[in-house]
Image (spheres, rainbow, N blue to C red):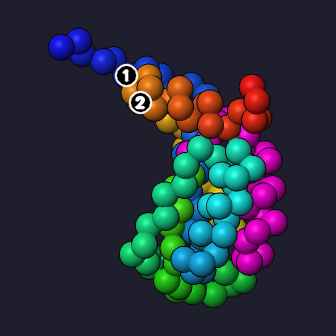
Amino acid sequence: MKEKKMVAGKRNRVVLVTCESVTQARRIANGVVRKRLAACVNIVLSPVQSIYRWKGKVESAREVLMMIKTTEKQLTELENEVKHLHSYEIPEFIVIPIAGGSREYLAWLEESVQPAGK
């Protein structure tokens, strides 16, 4: 059996976004996948505990984490859509480069965010 090689994910990104609820996360996930701004969104159903500084005070909240898979080219439009659909004044939007992955998965990711018909 041939060993499949990992390839560099030069143009591929994972974006972390936290939300106030699963309902909000699902609405954002459906919106960005339908608009082809993301290939896939994982929603972590166990809440994360966030401790952060906001307007001079230390706050704490239970949030839902989303991991959005996309390409570098889609980042600006993805961020705009997340901000549009999100309830937070300043939603988390952290971009992590994908160092590598399976050739098939990364090809699928890139194909999934191409405009329909391309």
Q: Is residue 71 left or right of residue 46?
A: right
User: On the image, which quarter does residue 103 sit in?
Assistant: top left
- Mark earlier in primary sequence (1, 2): 1
The answer to whether 7 is drawn above or below residue 52 in the figure is: above
The answer to whether 117 is drawn above or below residue 51 in the figure is: above
Q: Return the mark for residue 41.
A: none
Task: Check contact, mark 1 vs mark 2: CB within 8 A.
Answer: yes
- Magenta stretch secondary structure, dominant: helix
Q: Residue at x 66, y 69 (%)?
A: 27
Q: Amino acid at mark 2?
A: Gly
- Looking at the figure, which quarter contains the N terminus? top left
Q: Residue at x 77, y 35 (%)?
A: 115
Looking at the image, the residue that sits furthest to the front is: 117
Asked if the magenta segment contains residue 81, the reply would be: yes
User: On the image, which quarter does residue 85 sit in?
Assistant: bottom right
Label 1: how many Cα within 10 Å (few below 14, some 14–19, many 20+): some
Q: Which residue is mark 2?
A: 101
Q: Residue at x 37, y 22 (%)?
A: 6
State the image coordinates of residue 104 (x, y, percent, origin top left): 44, 26
Q: Which residue is mark 1?
A: 6
| Spatial separation of the CA atoms under disc 1 and disc 2 | 5 Å
Q: Residue at x 71, y 46 (%)?
A: 37
Can the viewer see residue 12?
no
Looking at the image, the residue that sits furthest to the left is: 1
The answer to whether 69 is drawn above or below residue 85 in the figure is: above
Q: Is residue 99 left or right of residue 25?
A: left
Q: Nearer the viewer, residue 116 or 14?
A: 116
State the image coordinates of residue 112 (x, y, percent, origin top left): 62, 37
Asked if the magenta segment contains residue 103, the reply would be: no
Over which residues does the magenta segment extend? 69-89
The answer to whether 6 is drawn above or below residue 31 in the figure is: above
